[in-house]
Image: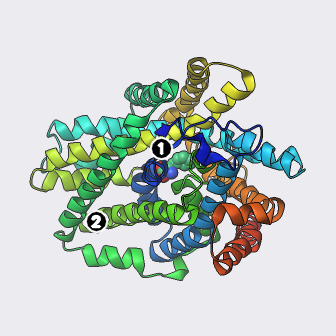
Protein backbone atom coordinates (compact mmCIF):
# COMPACT_ATOMS: atom_id res chain seq x y z
CA UNK A 1 0.00 0.00 0.00
CA UNK A 2 1.04 3.53 -0.58
CA UNK A 3 1.91 4.48 2.93
CA UNK A 4 4.59 6.42 4.66
CA UNK A 5 6.10 4.38 7.43
CA UNK A 6 7.64 7.21 9.39
CA UNK A 7 4.74 9.17 10.69
CA UNK A 8 3.25 7.11 13.46
CA UNK A 9 2.95 10.15 15.72
CA UNK A 10 -0.10 11.19 13.77
CA UNK A 11 -1.55 7.93 14.87
CA UNK A 12 -1.58 8.68 18.57
CA UNK A 13 -5.16 7.49 18.84
CA UNK A 14 -4.23 3.89 18.08
CA UNK A 15 -5.35 1.33 20.57
CA UNK A 16 -2.80 -0.30 22.76
CA UNK A 17 -1.69 -3.55 21.24
CA UNK A 18 -2.39 -2.38 17.75
CA UNK A 19 0.51 -2.04 15.47
CA UNK A 20 1.02 1.71 15.69
CA UNK A 21 4.21 1.45 13.64
CA UNK A 22 2.19 0.56 10.58
CA UNK A 23 2.57 3.14 7.90
CA UNK A 24 -0.15 5.57 7.05
CA UNK A 25 -1.54 6.70 3.74
CA UNK A 26 0.61 9.55 2.59
CA UNK A 27 -2.47 11.65 1.96
CA UNK A 28 -6.20 11.65 1.69
CA UNK A 29 -5.78 11.19 -2.04
CA UNK A 30 -3.75 8.02 -1.57
CA UNK A 31 -6.56 6.50 0.46
CA UNK A 32 -9.19 7.58 -2.05
CA UNK A 33 -7.13 6.04 -4.83
CA UNK A 34 -6.75 2.73 -3.07
CA UNK A 35 -10.38 2.58 -2.00
CA UNK A 36 -11.50 3.57 -5.49
CA UNK A 37 -9.19 0.96 -6.95
CA UNK A 38 -10.99 -1.63 -4.88
CA UNK A 39 -14.50 -0.29 -5.49
CA UNK A 40 -14.33 0.37 -9.22
CA UNK A 41 -14.01 -2.89 -11.07
CA UNK A 42 -16.01 -5.51 -12.89
CA UNK A 43 -18.90 -4.72 -10.55
CA UNK A 44 -19.38 -1.38 -12.24
CA UNK A 45 -18.80 -2.23 -15.85
CA UNK A 46 -19.67 -5.91 -16.14
CA UNK A 47 -22.17 -6.55 -13.37
CA UNK A 48 -24.16 -3.35 -13.00
CA UNK A 49 -25.40 -3.26 -16.63
CA UNK A 50 -26.33 -6.93 -16.71
CA UNK A 51 -28.18 -7.04 -13.39
CA UNK A 52 -29.97 -3.84 -14.39
CA UNK A 53 -30.98 -5.46 -17.67
CA UNK A 54 -32.11 -8.63 -15.94
CA UNK A 55 -34.17 -6.70 -13.41
CA UNK A 56 -36.03 -4.43 -15.77
CA UNK A 57 -34.12 -1.14 -15.61
CA UNK A 58 -35.30 2.11 -13.99
CA UNK A 59 -37.00 0.89 -10.82
CA UNK A 60 -34.06 -1.41 -10.10
CA UNK A 61 -31.60 1.45 -10.67
CA UNK A 62 -33.57 3.64 -8.29
CA UNK A 63 -33.50 1.01 -5.54
CA UNK A 64 -29.79 0.48 -6.16
CA UNK A 65 -29.12 4.23 -5.84
CA UNK A 66 -31.18 4.33 -2.65
CA UNK A 67 -29.20 1.41 -1.25
CA UNK A 68 -25.93 3.23 -2.03
CA UNK A 69 -27.10 6.39 -0.29
CA UNK A 70 -28.94 4.96 2.70
CA UNK A 71 -27.01 1.77 3.36
CA UNK A 72 -23.75 1.89 1.42
CA UNK A 73 -22.28 5.25 2.39
CA UNK A 74 -23.08 4.94 6.13
CA UNK A 75 -21.61 1.42 6.21
CA UNK A 76 -18.52 2.53 4.36
CA UNK A 77 -18.06 5.24 6.97
CA UNK A 78 -18.52 2.66 9.73
CA UNK A 79 -15.97 0.30 8.18
CA UNK A 80 -13.35 2.97 7.66
CA UNK A 81 -13.95 4.21 11.19
CA UNK A 82 -13.60 0.77 12.78
CA UNK A 83 -10.43 0.19 10.79
CA UNK A 84 -8.86 3.46 11.79
CA UNK A 85 -9.82 3.02 15.42
CA UNK A 86 -8.44 -0.49 15.59
CA UNK A 87 -5.37 0.30 13.55
CA UNK A 88 -4.60 -3.20 12.32
CA UNK A 89 -6.07 -6.00 10.23
CA UNK A 90 -9.87 -6.23 10.35
CA UNK A 91 -10.12 -9.32 12.53
CA UNK A 92 -7.60 -7.91 14.97
CA UNK A 93 -9.13 -4.41 14.89
CA UNK A 94 -12.52 -5.77 15.81
CA UNK A 95 -11.23 -7.88 18.64
CA UNK A 96 -9.07 -5.04 19.95
CA UNK A 97 -12.00 -2.65 20.00
CA UNK A 98 -14.16 -5.35 21.48
CA UNK A 99 -11.61 -6.18 24.19
CA UNK A 100 -10.93 -2.62 25.11
CA UNK A 101 -14.59 -1.83 25.37
CA UNK A 102 -15.04 -5.19 27.15
CA UNK A 103 -17.18 -6.45 24.37
CA UNK A 104 -17.73 -9.93 23.22
CA UNK A 105 -14.97 -10.97 20.90
CA UNK A 106 -17.50 -12.86 18.82
CA UNK A 107 -17.53 -9.65 16.81
CA UNK A 108 -14.45 -10.87 15.05
CA UNK A 109 -16.87 -13.00 13.12
CA UNK A 110 -17.49 -9.95 10.98
CA UNK A 111 -13.92 -10.19 9.80
CA UNK A 112 -14.21 -13.92 9.28
CA UNK A 113 -17.34 -13.64 7.10
CA UNK A 114 -15.51 -11.03 5.07
CA UNK A 115 -12.41 -13.11 4.57
CA UNK A 116 -14.45 -16.04 3.32
CA UNK A 117 -16.61 -13.85 1.07
CA UNK A 118 -13.57 -12.24 -0.54
CA UNK A 119 -12.02 -15.61 -1.21
CA UNK A 120 -15.20 -16.98 -2.81
CA UNK A 121 -15.80 -13.83 -4.87
CA UNK A 122 -12.27 -13.83 -6.23
CA UNK A 123 -12.71 -17.38 -7.53
CA UNK A 124 -15.29 -16.29 -10.10
CA UNK A 125 -14.17 -12.68 -10.39
CA UNK A 126 -10.92 -13.94 -11.80
CA UNK A 127 -12.77 -15.93 -14.45
CA UNK A 128 -14.55 -12.77 -15.62
CA UNK A 129 -11.25 -10.89 -15.43
CA UNK A 130 -10.05 -13.60 -17.82
CA UNK A 131 -12.84 -12.75 -20.26
CA UNK A 132 -11.59 -9.17 -20.29
CA UNK A 133 -8.04 -10.37 -20.99
CA UNK A 134 -9.29 -12.48 -23.84
CA UNK A 135 -11.08 -9.49 -25.38
CA UNK A 136 -7.88 -7.47 -25.58
CA UNK A 137 -6.69 -9.87 -28.25
CA UNK A 138 -10.10 -10.07 -29.91
CA UNK A 139 -10.28 -6.29 -30.27
CA UNK A 140 -6.64 -5.67 -31.09
CA UNK A 141 -6.65 -8.21 -33.91
CA UNK A 142 -9.31 -6.17 -35.69
CA UNK A 143 -11.63 -9.15 -36.08
CA UNK A 144 -14.56 -7.15 -34.72
CA UNK A 145 -14.52 -4.53 -37.45
CA UNK A 146 -17.95 -4.20 -39.02
CA UNK A 147 -19.25 -7.41 -37.45
CA UNK A 148 -22.94 -8.10 -36.96
CA UNK A 149 -24.53 -8.71 -33.58
CA UNK A 150 -24.75 -12.42 -34.42
CA UNK A 151 -21.07 -12.66 -35.25
CA UNK A 152 -20.11 -10.82 -32.06
CA UNK A 153 -22.41 -13.10 -30.08
CA UNK A 154 -20.80 -16.14 -31.70
CA UNK A 155 -17.32 -14.97 -30.69
CA UNK A 156 -18.51 -14.74 -27.10
CA UNK A 157 -20.24 -18.13 -27.10
CA UNK A 158 -17.10 -19.57 -28.64
CA UNK A 159 -15.07 -18.29 -25.71
CA UNK A 160 -17.52 -19.65 -23.12
CA UNK A 161 -17.60 -23.08 -24.68
CA UNK A 162 -13.84 -23.46 -24.50
CA UNK A 163 -12.73 -24.43 -20.96
CA UNK A 164 -9.04 -24.54 -21.85
CA UNK A 165 -8.90 -20.96 -23.08
CA UNK A 166 -10.99 -19.79 -20.13
CA UNK A 167 -8.64 -21.58 -17.78
CA UNK A 168 -5.59 -20.00 -19.36
CA UNK A 169 -6.95 -16.45 -18.95
CA UNK A 170 -8.26 -17.17 -15.45
CA UNK A 171 -4.80 -18.41 -14.52
CA UNK A 172 -3.16 -15.30 -15.91
CA UNK A 173 -5.54 -13.00 -14.04
CA UNK A 174 -5.04 -14.85 -10.76
CA UNK A 175 -1.28 -14.76 -11.25
CA UNK A 176 -1.40 -10.98 -11.74
CA UNK A 177 -3.31 -10.59 -8.49
CA UNK A 178 -1.04 -12.96 -6.59
CA UNK A 179 2.17 -11.26 -7.71
CA UNK A 180 1.06 -7.93 -6.29
CA UNK A 181 -0.35 -9.35 -3.07
CA UNK A 182 2.75 -11.45 -2.48
CA UNK A 183 5.03 -8.46 -2.85
CA UNK A 184 2.95 -6.60 -0.29
CA UNK A 185 3.94 -3.17 -1.54
CA UNK A 186 1.82 -1.67 -4.18
CA UNK A 187 2.53 2.00 -4.11
CA UNK A 188 3.22 1.93 -7.82
CA UNK A 189 -0.13 0.40 -8.49
CA UNK A 190 -1.98 2.93 -6.43
CA UNK A 191 -0.25 5.74 -8.23
CA UNK A 192 -1.27 4.11 -11.48
CA UNK A 193 -4.89 4.28 -10.33
CA UNK A 194 -4.68 8.06 -10.50
CA UNK A 195 -3.90 7.89 -14.22
CA UNK A 196 -5.64 4.75 -15.37
CA UNK A 197 -9.00 5.29 -13.64
CA UNK A 198 -9.52 8.69 -15.28
CA UNK A 199 -8.43 7.08 -18.55
CA UNK A 200 -11.09 4.39 -18.15
CA UNK A 201 -13.59 7.13 -17.43
CA UNK A 202 -12.64 8.95 -20.65
CA UNK A 203 -12.94 5.78 -22.70
CA UNK A 204 -16.35 5.13 -21.23
CA UNK A 205 -17.28 8.67 -22.26
CA UNK A 206 -16.08 7.91 -25.78
CA UNK A 207 -18.32 4.84 -25.93
CA UNK A 208 -21.21 6.88 -24.53
CA UNK A 209 -20.49 9.39 -27.31
CA UNK A 210 -20.69 6.59 -29.86
CA UNK A 211 -23.83 5.26 -28.19
CA UNK A 212 -25.46 8.66 -28.72
CA UNK A 213 -25.08 8.24 -32.46
CA UNK A 214 -27.01 4.96 -32.52
CA UNK A 215 -30.33 6.74 -32.35
CA UNK A 216 -31.37 4.75 -29.29
CA UNK A 217 -29.83 6.85 -26.58
CA UNK A 218 -33.19 8.26 -25.45
CA UNK A 219 -34.65 4.79 -25.16
CA UNK A 220 -31.67 3.66 -23.12
CA UNK A 221 -31.86 6.67 -20.81
CA UNK A 222 -35.56 6.02 -20.30
CA UNK A 223 -34.84 2.35 -19.60
CA UNK A 224 -32.27 3.31 -16.96
CA UNK A 225 -33.95 6.28 -15.35
CA UNK A 226 -37.72 5.97 -15.79
CA UNK A 227 -38.79 3.66 -13.00
CA UNK A 228 -41.42 1.13 -13.94
CA UNK A 229 -42.27 -0.45 -10.62
CA UNK A 230 -44.27 -3.23 -12.20
CA UNK A 231 -40.90 -4.69 -13.27
CA UNK A 232 -39.44 -4.69 -9.78
CA UNK A 233 -39.48 -8.00 -7.93
CA UNK A 234 -38.52 -8.81 -4.34
CA UNK A 235 -35.55 -10.73 -5.62
CA UNK A 236 -34.66 -7.65 -7.69
CA UNK A 237 -34.54 -5.63 -4.48
CA UNK A 238 -32.23 -8.21 -2.92
CA UNK A 239 -29.97 -8.04 -5.97
CA UNK A 240 -29.92 -4.21 -5.80
CA UNK A 241 -28.98 -4.31 -2.13
CA UNK A 242 -26.36 -6.99 -2.67
CA UNK A 243 -24.93 -5.10 -5.60
CA UNK A 244 -24.62 -1.90 -3.56
CA UNK A 245 -22.36 -3.85 -1.17
CA UNK A 246 -20.49 -5.59 -3.96
CA UNK A 247 -19.75 -2.49 -5.98
CA UNK A 248 -18.57 -0.45 -2.99
CA UNK A 249 -16.49 -3.38 -1.68
CA UNK A 250 -18.48 -3.42 1.55
CA UNK A 251 -19.40 -6.13 3.98
CA UNK A 252 -16.06 -7.91 3.82
CA UNK A 253 -13.88 -5.56 5.80
CA UNK A 254 -11.84 -4.30 2.85
CA UNK A 255 -12.61 -0.71 3.73
CA UNK A 256 -11.77 -1.57 7.33
CA UNK A 257 -8.36 -2.76 6.26
CA UNK A 258 -7.78 0.38 4.19
CA UNK A 259 -9.17 2.58 6.95
CA UNK A 260 -6.53 1.27 9.33
CA UNK A 261 -3.98 3.20 7.31
CA UNK A 262 -5.92 6.46 7.23
CA UNK A 263 -4.35 9.37 9.16
CA UNK A 264 -6.47 10.75 11.96
CA UNK A 265 -6.94 14.21 10.55
CA UNK A 266 -8.75 13.09 7.42
CA UNK A 267 -12.52 13.24 7.18
CA UNK A 268 -14.03 9.79 6.96
CA UNK A 269 -17.37 11.12 5.74
CA UNK A 270 -15.96 13.15 2.88
CA UNK A 271 -13.64 10.42 1.66
CA UNK A 272 -16.37 7.76 1.83
CA UNK A 273 -18.68 10.03 -0.09
CA UNK A 274 -16.05 10.70 -2.74
CA UNK A 275 -15.38 7.01 -3.30
CA UNK A 276 -19.09 6.20 -3.51
CA UNK A 277 -19.83 9.00 -5.95
CA UNK A 278 -16.99 8.00 -8.27
CA UNK A 279 -18.05 4.37 -8.12
CA UNK A 280 -21.68 5.12 -8.88
CA UNK A 281 -20.71 7.52 -11.67
CA UNK A 282 -18.69 4.82 -13.42
CA UNK A 283 -21.56 2.33 -13.17
CA UNK A 284 -24.13 4.75 -14.58
CA UNK A 285 -21.80 5.69 -17.42
CA UNK A 286 -21.35 2.03 -18.23
CA UNK A 287 -25.13 1.70 -18.38
CA UNK A 288 -25.38 4.68 -20.72
CA UNK A 289 -22.67 3.20 -22.92
CA UNK A 290 -24.20 -0.24 -23.19
CA UNK A 291 -27.98 0.06 -23.37
CA UNK A 292 -28.16 2.24 -26.52
CA UNK A 293 -26.15 -0.50 -28.27
CA UNK A 294 -28.49 -3.14 -26.85
CA UNK A 295 -31.58 -1.41 -28.22
CA UNK A 296 -30.02 -0.34 -31.51
CA UNK A 297 -29.14 -3.95 -32.30
CA UNK A 298 -32.31 -5.55 -31.03
CA UNK A 299 -30.42 -7.39 -28.30
CA UNK A 300 -31.95 -8.67 -25.09
CA UNK A 301 -31.30 -6.36 -22.05
CA UNK A 302 -31.67 -9.40 -19.78
CA UNK A 303 -29.03 -11.40 -21.65
CA UNK A 304 -27.12 -12.01 -18.42
CA UNK A 305 -23.43 -12.00 -17.54
CA UNK A 306 -22.33 -11.83 -21.17
CA UNK A 307 -24.09 -8.51 -21.81
CA UNK A 308 -21.08 -6.21 -22.06
CA UNK A 309 -19.15 -8.74 -24.13
CA UNK A 310 -22.00 -8.92 -26.61
CA UNK A 311 -22.53 -5.17 -26.87
CA UNK A 312 -19.27 -3.26 -26.45
CA UNK A 313 -17.46 -5.25 -29.17
CA UNK A 314 -20.21 -4.17 -31.56
CA UNK A 315 -19.52 -0.55 -30.73
CA UNK A 316 -15.78 -1.05 -31.14
CA UNK A 317 -16.40 -2.78 -34.45
CA UNK A 318 -18.33 0.17 -35.77
CA UNK A 319 -16.85 3.35 -34.36
CA UNK A 320 -13.87 5.12 -35.96
CA UNK A 321 -10.58 3.86 -34.49
CA UNK A 322 -12.64 1.20 -32.75
CA UNK A 323 -9.80 -1.35 -32.58
CA UNK A 324 -7.62 1.14 -30.77
CA UNK A 325 -10.30 2.33 -28.37
CA UNK A 326 -11.54 -1.19 -27.79
CA UNK A 327 -8.10 -2.54 -26.98
CA UNK A 328 -7.45 0.34 -24.62
CA UNK A 329 -10.84 -0.13 -23.01
CA UNK A 330 -10.30 -3.80 -22.23
CA UNK A 331 -6.77 -3.16 -20.98
CA UNK A 332 -8.14 -0.55 -18.58
CA UNK A 333 -10.95 -2.88 -17.55
CA UNK A 334 -8.37 -5.52 -16.68
CA UNK A 335 -6.52 -2.96 -14.63
CA UNK A 336 -9.70 -1.95 -12.77
CA UNK A 337 -10.47 -5.62 -12.13
CA UNK A 338 -6.90 -6.24 -11.02
CA UNK A 339 -6.96 -3.55 -8.30
CA UNK A 340 -10.28 -4.98 -7.07
CA UNK A 341 -8.97 -8.53 -7.20
CA UNK A 342 -6.02 -7.56 -5.04
CA UNK A 343 -8.37 -6.24 -2.38
CA UNK A 344 -10.32 -9.51 -2.49
CA UNK A 345 -7.25 -11.66 -1.84
CA UNK A 346 -5.56 -9.34 0.65
CA UNK A 347 -7.80 -10.07 3.69
CA UNK A 348 -7.27 -13.83 3.67
CA UNK A 349 -3.54 -13.46 3.10
CA UNK A 350 -3.30 -11.00 5.96
CA UNK A 351 -5.23 -13.38 8.16
CA UNK A 352 -2.97 -16.34 7.31
CA UNK A 353 0.07 -14.21 8.08
CA UNK A 354 -1.24 -12.88 11.34
CA UNK A 355 -2.94 -15.99 12.65
CA UNK A 356 -1.07 -18.87 11.18
CA UNK A 357 2.32 -17.22 11.19
CA UNK A 358 2.95 -17.97 7.53
CA UNK A 359 5.06 -15.56 5.57
CA UNK A 360 3.45 -13.47 2.89
CA UNK A 361 4.65 -15.43 -0.10
CA UNK A 362 3.49 -18.74 1.32
CA UNK A 363 0.09 -17.38 2.38
CA UNK A 364 -0.43 -15.77 -1.01
CA UNK A 365 0.51 -18.95 -2.84
CA UNK A 366 -1.68 -21.10 -0.59
CA UNK A 367 -4.79 -18.92 -0.70
CA UNK A 368 -4.31 -18.00 -4.36
CA UNK A 369 -3.95 -21.56 -5.58
CA UNK A 370 -6.99 -22.83 -3.68
CA UNK A 371 -9.00 -19.89 -4.99
CA UNK A 372 -7.76 -20.57 -8.51
CA UNK A 373 -8.82 -24.21 -8.21
CA UNK A 374 -12.27 -23.17 -7.05
CA UNK A 375 -12.48 -20.91 -10.10
CA UNK A 376 -12.38 -24.03 -12.27
CA UNK A 377 -15.88 -24.88 -11.02
CA UNK A 378 -17.07 -21.50 -12.32
CA UNK A 379 -15.39 -22.11 -15.65
CA UNK A 380 -17.09 -25.47 -16.03
CA UNK A 381 -20.43 -23.88 -15.10
CA UNK A 382 -20.21 -21.99 -18.38
CA UNK A 383 -19.91 -25.08 -20.53
CA UNK A 384 -19.65 -28.73 -19.43
CA UNK A 385 -21.63 -28.17 -16.22
CA UNK A 386 -24.01 -25.54 -17.54
CA UNK A 387 -27.00 -27.72 -16.72
CA UNK A 388 -25.76 -28.64 -13.29
CA UNK A 389 -27.76 -26.76 -10.64
CA UNK A 390 -26.57 -28.28 -7.35
CA UNK A 391 -29.21 -26.50 -5.24
CA UNK A 392 -31.90 -26.53 -7.88
CA UNK A 393 -34.38 -28.13 -5.47
CA UNK A 394 -34.64 -24.80 -3.60
CA UNK A 395 -37.22 -22.77 -5.54
CA UNK A 396 -35.18 -19.55 -5.33
CA UNK A 397 -32.04 -21.25 -6.63
CA UNK A 398 -33.61 -23.12 -9.50
CA UNK A 399 -31.36 -23.38 -12.52
CA UNK A 400 -28.44 -21.66 -10.81
CA UNK A 401 -25.07 -23.08 -11.79
CA UNK A 402 -22.11 -23.16 -9.39
CA UNK A 403 -20.98 -19.84 -10.81
CA UNK A 404 -24.46 -18.32 -10.27
CA UNK A 405 -24.60 -19.71 -6.74
CA UNK A 406 -21.20 -18.31 -5.77
CA UNK A 407 -22.26 -14.91 -7.07
CA UNK A 408 -25.65 -15.14 -5.38
CA UNK A 409 -24.45 -16.23 -1.96
CA UNK A 410 -21.51 -13.87 -1.74
CA UNK A 411 -23.05 -10.68 -3.12
CA UNK A 412 -26.63 -11.11 -1.97
CA UNK A 413 -26.20 -12.93 1.34
CA UNK A 414 -22.68 -12.76 2.75
CA UNK A 415 -21.87 -9.13 1.99
CA UNK A 416 -25.18 -7.72 3.28
CA UNK A 417 -24.80 -9.95 6.33
CA UNK A 418 -21.28 -8.66 6.90
CA UNK A 419 -22.61 -5.13 6.44
CA UNK A 420 -25.41 -5.80 8.90
CA UNK A 421 -22.90 -6.94 11.51
CA UNK A 422 -20.76 -3.85 10.88
CA UNK A 423 -23.84 -1.65 11.30
CA UNK A 424 -24.79 -3.40 14.54
CA UNK A 425 -21.24 -3.20 15.82
CA UNK A 426 -20.98 0.52 15.11
CA UNK A 427 -24.57 1.31 16.04
CA UNK A 428 -24.92 -0.66 19.24
CA UNK A 429 -21.58 -1.90 20.46
CA UNK A 430 -18.82 0.65 19.98
CA UNK A 431 -18.49 3.52 22.40
CA UNK A 432 -20.28 6.62 21.20
CA UNK A 433 -17.49 8.85 22.39
CA UNK A 434 -14.90 7.03 20.36
CA UNK A 435 -17.07 7.20 17.27
CA UNK A 436 -17.74 10.90 17.69
CA UNK A 437 -14.03 11.48 17.88
CA UNK A 438 -13.29 9.36 14.82
CA UNK A 439 -16.00 10.80 12.61
CA UNK A 440 -15.86 14.41 13.86
CA UNK A 441 -19.16 15.31 12.27
CA UNK A 442 -21.52 18.05 13.38
CA UNK A 443 -23.88 16.75 16.11
CA UNK A 444 -26.81 16.70 13.69
CA UNK A 445 -24.88 14.75 11.03
CA UNK A 446 -23.50 12.37 13.63
CA UNK A 447 -26.99 11.61 14.90
CA UNK A 448 -28.27 11.10 11.39
CA UNK A 449 -25.46 8.65 10.74
CA UNK A 450 -26.01 6.89 14.05
CA UNK A 451 -29.74 6.48 13.43
CA UNK A 452 -28.94 5.06 10.02
CA UNK A 453 -26.51 2.42 11.24
CA UNK A 454 -28.59 1.66 14.32
CA UNK A 455 -31.97 1.31 12.72
CA UNK A 456 -32.25 2.00 9.02
CA UNK A 457 -29.54 -0.35 7.75
CA UNK A 458 -30.34 -3.31 10.00
CA UNK A 459 -34.06 -3.01 9.32
CA UNK A 460 -33.54 -2.62 5.58
CA UNK A 461 -31.25 -5.64 5.35
CA UNK A 462 -33.49 -7.74 7.59
CA UNK A 463 -36.67 -6.85 5.71
CA UNK A 464 -35.12 -7.64 2.34
CA UNK A 465 -33.78 -10.96 3.65
CA UNK A 466 -37.05 -11.99 5.24
CA UNK A 467 -39.14 -11.07 2.20
CA UNK A 468 -36.91 -13.10 -0.01
CA UNK A 469 -37.00 -16.12 2.23
CA UNK A 470 -40.79 -16.13 2.22
N1 LIG B 1 -16.12 -3.59 -5.76
C1 LIG B 1 -15.50 -4.48 -6.70
C2 LIG B 1 -16.17 -4.28 -8.05
O1 LIG B 1 -17.16 -3.58 -8.14
C3 LIG B 1 -15.59 -5.91 -6.26
C4 LIG B 1 -15.22 -6.13 -4.84
C5 LIG B 1 -16.18 -6.56 -3.93
C6 LIG B 1 -13.93 -5.87 -4.40
C7 LIG B 1 -15.86 -6.72 -2.59
C8 LIG B 1 -13.59 -6.04 -3.06
C9 LIG B 1 -14.56 -6.45 -2.17
O2 LIG B 1 -15.75 -4.81 -9.02
| Residue in the image at 71% along x and 20% along y | 357
Q: Nearer the viewer, residue 423 or 319?
A: 423
Q: Is residue 118 left or right of residue 43?
A: right
Q: Sequence-wise, which precedes: disc 1 or disc 2?
A: 2
- Residue 226's image quarter? bottom left
Picture quarter with the C terminus: bottom right
Q: Residue placed farthest to the front in the image?
A: 9
What residue appears at the point 37 percent right and 35 percent down from the top-left corner? Answer: 188
* Disc marking residue 340: 1
**Going 9% across and 55% down the picture, which residue do you hit?**
320
* Dot in front, 1 or 2: 1
> Residue 24: x percent and y percent?
54, 42
Residue 370 seen in this snapshot: yes
Residue 101 percent location from the top left of the image: 86, 52
User: Mark 1: few, some, or many residues within 10 Å (few <14, many ≥20)?
Assistant: many
Residue lying at the far left in this picture: please name it.
320
Asked if residue 454 is positioned above or below residue 309 in the image, the reply reads below
Cα separation, mark 1 vs mark 2, equals: 33 Å
Q: Which numbered marker is on residue 437? A: none
Q: Is mark 1 within 8 Å of ligand 1?
A: yes
**Quick one: SS at disc 2?**
loop
* Residue 419 relative to residue 166: left or right: right
Q: Which residue is mark 2?
A: 298
Residue 405 seen in render: no
Q: Is residue 333 above or below residue 289?
A: above
Q: Residue at image x 70%, y 46%? A: 14
Q: Whole-percent x and y of residue 297?
A: 25, 63
Q: Position of residue 191 (x, y in %)?
A: 36, 42
Amino acid sequence: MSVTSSDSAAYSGALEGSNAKRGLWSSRLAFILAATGSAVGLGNIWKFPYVTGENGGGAFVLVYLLCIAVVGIPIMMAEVMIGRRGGCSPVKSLSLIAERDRLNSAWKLVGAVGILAGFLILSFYSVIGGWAISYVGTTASGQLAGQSAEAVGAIFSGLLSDPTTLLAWHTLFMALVMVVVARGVRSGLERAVSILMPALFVLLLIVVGYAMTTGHFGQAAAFLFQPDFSKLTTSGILVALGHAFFTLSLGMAVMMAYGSYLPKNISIAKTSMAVSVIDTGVALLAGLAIFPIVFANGLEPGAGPGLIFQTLPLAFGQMPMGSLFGTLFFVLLIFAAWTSGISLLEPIVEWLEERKGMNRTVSTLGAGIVCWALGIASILSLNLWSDFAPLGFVPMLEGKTIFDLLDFFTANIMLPLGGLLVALFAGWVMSRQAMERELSLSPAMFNLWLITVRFVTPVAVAVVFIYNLM
